[in-house]
Image (spheres, helix red, strand yellow):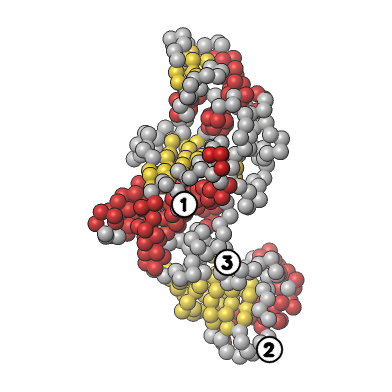
Amino acid sequence: MHRPIDGPGHGGGGFDGEGDGAGHGPVPPPCRPHPAPGDPSGPRRGAPAPRPGTPATLPAGSWDGAHDAPDPGRVDPRVLGALLARHGWRRRGGAAGRYSRWTPPGTGTGTSLLVPESRAFPDCEDLLGEALAALAHSATPSAREILTGLAVPGDEIRWWRDVPPGPAGTVPWTAREQLGSAARQLLLAGALAVRGRAGYYGARHRRPARASLEGVLVGASPDGRGLTAFLPVEPGRPIAVRLHHALHAAREAVDYRRATGGTEAFDAAVGAGVSRELTEALVALVRGTEGARVALEWAPTAGPPEGCAARPEPVEFSPGDLPALREASARYRTGEPSVPVRLTGAVVRMRRSGPRGAGTVRLRVLGGAEVPHVRVTLDEEAYRTAGHAHLVGLPIRVSGRLESRGGFRRLTDASEVVPVQVDETERDRLMKALHENLDFFEEACGPED
């Protein structure tokens, strides 16, 4: 009786639309995993991203072939040296002023690298080519991340979770999945905060926030306890900066709550980017562990952003922080006010209990609000106006308040419902959707049995 106008591919979740990542449905991963270079089955640069639901993990193993290493003619040796130092490689001397020798972390066993000090010497490119080829064939886990950092210059965000080991000291598969899910939620929270400050976003801004994360590469450590995201400086730097400030503000707010019992610090933390989405991501990161931490490393090519430490300290959270984080999450959801809007939307579903009286419509939002769909209850006259507008292929404009309850998917106090003229292309598209689903429209508008 209540089938959608726009076909079975839309509205499958009723009027709720997309999940918001905070207990209201699944959140598709906003980032894509980077493959082991040399793996012909993995996505190449320029290839489409994998389907939602692809695990954000990186297969173990070394790079299979030096031809997949970055072009030595485009590699800055100073950047390579900075990345080697970041990942624990040790500098063991070399010809002063010409090159330095680097050995792998740990015992230092394995192939050492000769890295030129600058590009001022004729053999610079040859040395870089040999160093990159050695990294491409290296079994050292950090070698792949160093090559990725060279190929995709950007900021790095690292997550670690201290989880109880499974059989033979391995990390259970479910724990790896929880880490990937928490990392995706945290990245999305940072991308949302770039769009504007709010204690609770719900369905707002999610489409552009996910789009801003399409270039992010994610890889897991071999032991399954760590995860690294590579955010290109352009356009990923604002997300990394916002997460840097938000994580430290959340840490300070949690400390204040545990020391004094007050929650007002969480209100001030909203200005730094803390939100329900971020606190829920931290809960998912810490839950089931003995502790977790997040660290940021700035791109050597761009240097640290203004107002941020050159080498930020990792931010740590423990199971003892969970009550404060959960309390803040609930506080943000109930405290976010409704938003007055005047939006334009195409009618995609109509329903009422009889041939007369008020009814409910679902609109695909075209403008006026940063949500994909809203549900609105209209009186009899406004409901008739919405139906006529849809029949002739026109959207409607309506004023009201976007309610925070339900994730900003409901418009209340609706008024001033009028059809809106659109260009012929959009009108033809709306009319085509109507004709393709005319039986759904007639059934939805008729009286209930």
Vertical placement of residue 262 versus 50, above or below: below
Dots 2 and 3: beta carbons under 8 Å? no
Is 83 drawn above or below residue 326 in the view shown?
Answer: above
Q: Which residue is mark 3?
A: 17
Residue lying at the far front of the rendered structure: 168
Label 2 to label 3: alpha-carbon separation: 26 Å
Q: CA distance from mark 1 to mark 3?
A: 30 Å
Along the horizontal axis of the image, is 7 left or right of 301?
right
Identify the residue shown where x is 43% and y is 43%: 294
Where is residue 214? Give x, y as percent. 57, 47
Res 373 quadrant in image = bottom right
Mark 3 or mark 2, which is nearer the start of the sequence?
3
Does residue 179 appear in the picture of this structure? yes
Mark 1 and mark 2 lie on one chain; the one further toward the N terminus is 1
Q: What residue did someone put label 1 on?
A: 288
- Mark 2: amino acid: Asp
Residue visible at 46% across and 9% down in the picture: 95
Whichever of callouts 1 and 3 sits on the residue coming sooner in the sequence is: 3
Image quarter of the C terminus: bottom right
What residue does disc 2 label? 449
Extreme residue in the top direction: 95
Report the number of numbered marks: 3
SS for callout 1:
loop
Q: Secondary structure at mark 3?
A: loop
When asked about the image quadrant of residue 128, the answer is: top right
